[in-house]
Image: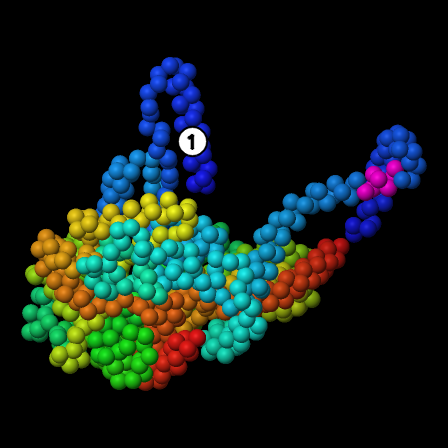
Amino acid sequence: MSYADMKPGAGAPAHTISATRQGSTSHKTGGTQKTGHLTAWRRRQLAGWLFLAPAIAYILFAFALPIVYNVMLSFELTSPATIGHFTAPFAGLANYRFILNDPTSTTAIIHTFEFTAGSLAGQFIIGFALALLFTVRFPGRTVGRSLVIIPWLLPLIVTGVIFKFLFQLEGGAVNQLLIDIGIAHHPIDWLDNPHLALWTILIANIWLGVPFFTLLLYSALQDVPVEVKEAALMDGAGPWQRLRLVIVPIIMPVIEITFLLGFVFTVKVFDLVIGLTGGGPANATQLITTWSYNLSFQQFSFGEGAALNNILLVLALICAPLYLLLSRDSLRRSSGAAR
Amino acid sequence: MKLLTKTRHRGLAALAAAAVAVTGLSQVTAFGATKITLTEEDYFNTPGQLSALAAYTKQFEAAHPGVTITRQYVPFANLDTKLLTQATGNVLPNLLAVDNPFVSTMISTGQVVPLSGMKGFSTKGYYPAVINEGLSNGKYYSYPVAGANSVALIYNIPMLKAAHVAPPKTWAQLVSAAKALTTSTRYGIALTCEAAEDTTWQWEPFFWGNGGKGNFSNIASAPGVQALSLWKQLVTDGSASKACLNWSQTPAASSQYIAGKAAMMVNGPWNFPTLNLNHMYYGKQFGVVPVPVRVPGQKSIVPLGGEDWMISKSGGSAAQQLAFDYIQGMQTPAQELTLAKAFGYLPGKVAVAQTYLKQVGPEWKVFIDQTLYARPRTLGLGVKYPKISQAVWTAIQSALSGQQSVKGALSTAQSQINTILKG
């Protein structure tokens, strides 16, 4: 299965062919069969690198360069005046010190964690419930399943506008509904109250992320073998036990991956906040993404913005190996389960 | 790129000349003039603005054979970022029309050239605030594009009449008028307090008119505390909606006014066309008074809005000179009047503004008069202004949303501003 296993088997015939062909040319240079073999190997190596080169160039340009530049920026004293040059005076840790002492930055970091944890929890609970619901046969199941995907099809900024209309203080649909059914007596300032605004954005983001969780978990549930479920039923397991002890362990690899991808999607939420509150009121809904954008492109402190962004980068760097580890692990487990 | 086009055209000229020679026609052709293309970037997008600029460009190109102006539209939200990126690569367009708070930032990139010293440059006749937007270290870097604009109190005449209130002149009158005008279906006044520059800009006349300093260094003292307490009271009284925390000046707050959900608003002359479109006409449906002052005798000091032309270093002195000719040509009284009308702005020169008043109507009077005492937002602050403005609107949001008291919010802002001013 691994690359090392494949090499001798697959490589052997190719070796002989290229070696004999190489042999005729190497006669002129007086080389032996062995050096001819080496040249062929080297040539194949070279060809391999040549084929890899575009990908390497792409990765260097599209991933490495921006990251390196961002790290450089975070250690520089930047201003619009330094923008004409590639580098700016060295700032040491000043930008990071600013971020740690800036109350808005520190709350933005905390908010990002709270927001991510809240979003994932809500998205998972609702998404899993819907996925389970769709495994049950009922009229309108297919329609319901297609409807669930709709939030996913909308551009984030459109979602922002929709939720702004829904939750606005004056004439918002949510307030109207709450007053009409008698739950609230006066309009609630969903987006205008610093203590509520982040919750409102959280609701919008959960709504947005549910389709992703539903779809992935639903397809995982489809893959749970019927025999296993029937066996559990025969053994007298109740619905809750079947779910907890049989179904969840089987789809665990998918749950893990879904959470990880959900984490990545949530941690970089930006458009939704900009569309709903612009980070206000009084910075109550600033996340790492929105506040670093604000620092960089509204206050033109590119260094400080880059420093805050690097915190997000570190989070992503922690997540990437975790993702690889989990996916490898779950691959192994699911292939084991299939056997 | 410009060099390329130039050489290519020269090549074409040579080819054409050869062709002429071959056919034996030895006429002198017009190919002697060098071809040059100037690039221009702005965010103008109303039909009036576009046609006025296009007409001027056509006229300019006709008067300068061989010169082409290529315009590039960039949406408002992206222009600043785009220009900064272009400044990084030293590839700025020859001509840039930037929002005036951004002028200082562009100057500090070192990629734009001063207009002072260019042949024909003059600051004579302009409202000081209009021309001083581009003043840095004794040099002027900009000309107004189509003049300037500012804010005043726009009120609904029938509503005020029905409630038996006169247009407010002082803060006390504003508070009582707003209260009297508030009903179950409408607010007395629509304010703007979203997390953006237009919030600071709306509050500036209240603060500056009450003795607030241009650099906000006394924001936590009486002028600031009184001005923010006024806004807070309007919200606490229920005369202004707390929803203003997510309202932009235009179109959010202005559409509340137009829909009859607010009897007054602090807003600018760019609303006149929209008001007329909604059958609201000056003198009958709406009136304009200066932003009220705390005590009689104070003068409303408004910030100035509008865009400024700047010239980049790109293309060398020939291109710079041509770019200057382009914007200099717009500073004639006739062009100023045409552009100001098309943009819904007021002309940048005092005398031209008086002519304008006669031509366009009395709804402009307040705006024209108060521009004499207006203040450019970035004067003396330069690139620090965006940071200070952010501290100010955050304090306004903090106080109005009830997160902090007025004094608490302002002293937070004060300490931030002190740090920014020191840095």
Q: Chain of mark 1?
A: B
The residue pinned by badge 1 equals B10
Q: Is residue B211 visible?
A: yes
Question: Residue A38 magenta-drawn?
Answer: yes
Task: Tell me the kind of residue under disc 1.
Answer: Arg
Residue at 42% over, 71% down: A285
Direction from residue B176 to residue A56 in the image, left or right:
right
- Can I make out residue B58 in this image? no
Residue A284 in which image quadrant: bottom left
Give the residue displayed 57% in from the left and 64% down from the top. A72
**Foreground pick, A284 / B70:** B70
- Residue A238: x and y in percent read 62, 69
Q: Nearer the viewer, residue B207 or A197?
A: B207
Tag 1's secondary structure? helix
Q: Front-most of A121 and A243?
A: A121
Task: Examine the structure image and report whether residue B23 is included in the region drawn in magenta.
Answer: no
Q: Principal SS element in the magenta part?
A: helix
Locate residue A9 relative to residue A289 in the image: left or right. right
The residue located at (70%, 59%) in the rendering is A328
Residue B179 left/right relative to B15: left
Mark 1 crowdedness (10 Å alpha carbons): few <14, some 14-19, many ≥20: some
Q: Position of residue A96 (x, y in %)?
A: 54, 73
Above or below for B313 versus A78: above
The image shows residue A1 at horizontal and vertical percentages of 79, 50
| Magenta extent | A36-42
Q: Quadrant of residue A260?
A: bottom right
* Residue farthest to the top, as pictured: B24
Q: How many marks?
A: 1
Residue plotted at (86% across, 30% down): A25
- The picture places residue A297, in percent across and down from the top left corner, at 43, 63
